[in-house]
Image (cartoon, rainbow, N blue to C red):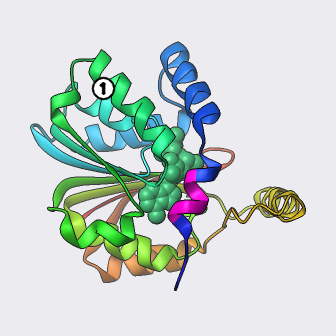
Amino acid sequence: MPCNCCEITDHTFNEEDAKSDIKEYRKRGPAEQTQLILDAVRSLGLKDATLLDVGGGVGTIHHELLEDTARQATHVDASSAYLQQAKEEAARRGHAGRVQFIHADFTDVADDLPQADIVTLDRVVCCYPDFRGLLNAAAGRSKRALALTYPRETWYFRVGIRVINFFQNLGRDPFRVFLHPIAEMNALLEGRGMKRVFVQRLFLWEMALYTRA
Ligand SMILES: C[S@@+](CC[C@H](N)C(=O)[O-])C[C@H]1O[C@@H](n2cnc3c(N)ncnc32)[C@H](O)[C@@H]1O
């Protein structure tokens, strides 16, 4: 699907949001749904793993997993502002040399990236129209595990997304939020050799952990 998604996303996840998110992370630690991913990945007991964090925002997942699970991380993000905050935080934590930062739409660069033991997508699939392209690329890069969060298919999320997209449209902003079908996302990942081994739900978000079957 032709899409100037990177441009749209870059504009949406701007410097102001990135600064606010990093401030929040420093103050309160990982957000609840991010913590589900961290706990799920840690439950696998991997050590010295490689991590590919797609749409990692301010980099919470690699900041945390480089402490005890990963030796090296790649952070691909469509937002230059978020990447900048992630880089500064990595430097502050003394991890900068262990993280590769790539500003791109992941689906454009996935084929050029090495496979990683762990692939994560925290609240990313809901920002991207082509979930098949995104998840196919993510599964293709995962050697051992893939963990993601996505919106639950609840009536209140459906209403919320309609309201958000209504205002996006009104403001002539092309960015949209998506509620992709969970069963189809699961079928796609299982078709790519991943097995769903764990699911957890919050009020808004669901987290699924897959391991290579
Ligand atoms: C809602 S934010 C989530 C950030 C972070 N994962 C978190 O949960 O705090 C979505 C992030 O995904 C990135 N993103 C969306 N689609 C992307 C794509 N196709 N390739 C790379 N990054 C993408 C955005 O730039 C943004 O940083």
Tell me how many marks there are.
1
In this rendering, the answer to whether 188 lies above or below 196 is below
Residue at 37% across, 64% down: 106
Give the residue displayed 57% in from the left and 57% down from the top: 9
Above or below for 200 versus 96 = below
Q: Name the image quarter holding residue 113.
A: bottom left
Whether residue 200 is visible to the viewer of this picture, yes or no, is: no
Q: Which residue is mark 1?
A: 90
Percent from the top left, x then y, of residue 192? Answer: 29, 79
Place of residue 206 in the rendered image (x, y in percent of width and height, measured from the top left): 56, 53
- Which element carries disc 1, helix, strand or loop? helix
Q: Residue furthest left?
A: 48
The image shows residue 153 at horizontal and vertical percentages of 68, 65
Which contiguous range is marked in magenta? 6-10
Which is more toward the observer, 38 or 167? 167
Q: Is residue 187 above or below residue 159?
A: below
What amino acid type should be assigned to the residue bearing mark 1? Ala
Magenta span: helix, strand or loop, mainly?
helix
Q: Residue 36 at x, y = what percent? A: 45, 40
- Would you say 8 lies left or right of 176 here? left
- In the picture, measured across the screen, residue 130 lies left or right of residue 74, that is right
Image position of 106 with respect to 206: above or below: below
